[in-house]
Image (cartoon, helix red, strand yellow):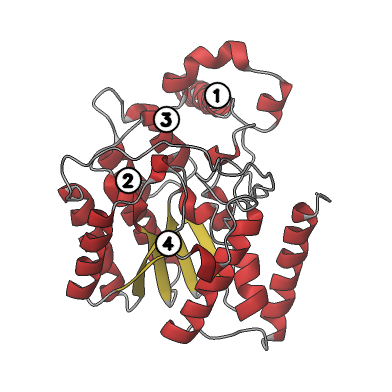
């Protein structure tokens, strides 16, 4: 009997230590509540409805496509599964996870990420991957993204990575350690309402490309995405969202490679570079950071433009006649406009 009690006591102590370790790891990991871009993927797990269109990619999707506008104008239910500087291998594993949960009619992938052939920064990967739910897909994404200096164990036990953050903690970190942060976005869209126009006097020019080919590893994972979509009967649509900055310059050589790739793989590719007048973009009002990204006013214009393409070129149906779905999206659209109008 005493032996049994000792075993039970040991197990209980072990569970307490493990629980405390996980809790403190979550607290330390989350000492970045002011960084909204660190919590973009988690909102998807709370959705119970399905989507006809899923956007996957980097900042150009989560700040460029507005699901509320897409449903309001075209009746297309959608979700944005984007994260900061999301690499193609991360997008692939996020796609795997998505297709395990639902089968949309189309996946829209933003091609800017193809410029990266390796993980650029550990911090960027962690902002994407730490908010994924644990699964084989997350584990594969971590392995594909890790730098040589990283430890796989630190993803399971964040306290090993963030132990130096003790001095940054305050009461909110302990209070919100296990929050899902699902109210940060609107179906994955991160709203930016500021206005900081492009400087028309800037003389900065893009760097000259040494190698005009996109990295082989990036193309390899794009092939994987195309194959996975085909296997699941989902259309893969490639898009290059608009930007007006040399930092995110989309070279004509890359664009030509995408045109050729799309033709060879029977995919649609839409580049919005140079389509400002057609879209209605005004870089004096439609960006919050001098042309690097769109603000909400620019994102609505891009979404309206692209929504017409989805409806007319790809036959994505209008669900506004579905009363139940319209009621659900009506609530989401109301919440969207409250924040847009400064009421949230």
Q: Of marks 1 and 4, which one's residue comes earlier in the chain?
A: 1
Left or right, 297 with reference to 250:
right
* C-alpha gap between disc 2 and disc 3: 14 Å
Q: Of marks 1 and 3, which one's residue comes earlier in the chain?
A: 1
4 or 3: mark nearer the eye: 4
| Mark 3 lies on residue | 123
- What is the quadrant of residue 198 in the picture? top right
Crowding around mark 2 (Cα neighbors within 10 Å: few <14, some 14 to 19, many 20+) is many
Q: Of marks 4 and 3, which one's residue comes earlier in the chain?
A: 3
* C-alpha gap between disc 1 and disc 2: 30 Å
Left or right, 131 with reference to 338:
left
Provide the secondary structure element on which disc 2 rests. helix
2 or 3: mark nearer the eye: 3
| Mark 4 lies on residue | 274
Q: Residue at x 51, y 23 (%)?
A: 21
Asked if residue 100 can be seen in this view, the reply is no
Q: Of marks 2 and 3, which one's residue comes earlier in the chain?
A: 3
Provide the secondary structure element on which disc 1 rests. helix
Which residue lies most toward the bottom here? 321
1 or 2: mark nearer the eye: 2
Q: Position of residue 131 (x, y in %)?
A: 50, 42
* Vertical comparison of 44 with 102: above or below: above
| Mark 1 lies on residue | 16
Which residue lies most toward the top here? 167
* C-alpha gap between disc 4 and disc 3: 32 Å
Q: Residue at x 65, y 51 (%)?
A: 285
Crowding around mark 1 (Cα neighbors within 10 Å: few <14, some 14 to 19, many 20+) is few
* C-alpha gap between disc 1 and disc 3: 30 Å
| Mark 2 lies on residue | 141
1 or 4: mark nearer the eye: 4
Q: Residue at x 48, y 56 (%)?
A: 61
* C-alpha gap between disc 1 and disc 4: 59 Å
């Amino acid at each position: 009997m005493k032996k049994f009690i000792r075993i039970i006591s040991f197990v209980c102590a072990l569970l307490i230590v493990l629980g405390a370790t996980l809790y403190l790891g979550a607290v330390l990991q989350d000492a970045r509540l002011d960084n909204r871009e660190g919590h973009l993927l988690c909102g998807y797990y709370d959705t119970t409805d399905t989507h006809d269109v899923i956007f996957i990619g980097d900042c150009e999707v989560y700040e460029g496509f507005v699901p509320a506008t897409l449903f309001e104008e075209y009746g297309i239910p959608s979700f944005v599964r984007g994260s900061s500087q999301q690499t193609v291998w991360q997008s692939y594993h996020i796609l795997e996870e998505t297709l395990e949960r639902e089968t949309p009619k189309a996946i829209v992938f933003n091609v800017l990420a193809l410029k990266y052939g390796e993980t650029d920064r550990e911090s960027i990967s962690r902002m994407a991957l730490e908010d994924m739910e644990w699964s084989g897909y997350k584990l594969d994404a971590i392995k594909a993204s890790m730098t040589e200096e990283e430890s796989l164990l630190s993803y399971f036990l964040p306290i090993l990575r963030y132990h130096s953050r003790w001095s940054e903690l305050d009461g909110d970190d302990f209070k919100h350690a296990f929050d899902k942060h699902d109210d940060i976005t609107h179906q994955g869209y991160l709203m930016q309402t500021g206005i900081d126009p492009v400087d028309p006097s800037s003389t900065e020019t893009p760097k000259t490309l040494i190698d005009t080919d996109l990295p082989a590893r990036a193309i390899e994972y794009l092939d994987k995405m195309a194959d996975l979509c085909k296997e699941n009967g989902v259309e893969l649509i490639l898009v290059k969202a608009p930007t007006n900055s040399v930092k995110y310059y989309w070279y004509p050589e890359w664009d030509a490679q995408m045109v050729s790739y799309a033709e060879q793989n029977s995919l649609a590719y839409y580049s919005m570079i140079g389509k400002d007048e057609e879209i209605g973009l005004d870089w004096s009002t439609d960006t919050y950071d001098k042309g690097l990204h769109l603000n909400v006013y620019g994102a609505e214009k891009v979404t309206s433009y692209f929504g017409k393409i989805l409806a007319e070129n790809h036959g994505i149906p209008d669900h506004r006649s579905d009363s139940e779905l319209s009621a659900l999206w009506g609530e989401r659209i109301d919440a969207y406009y409250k924040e847009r109008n400064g009421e949230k």
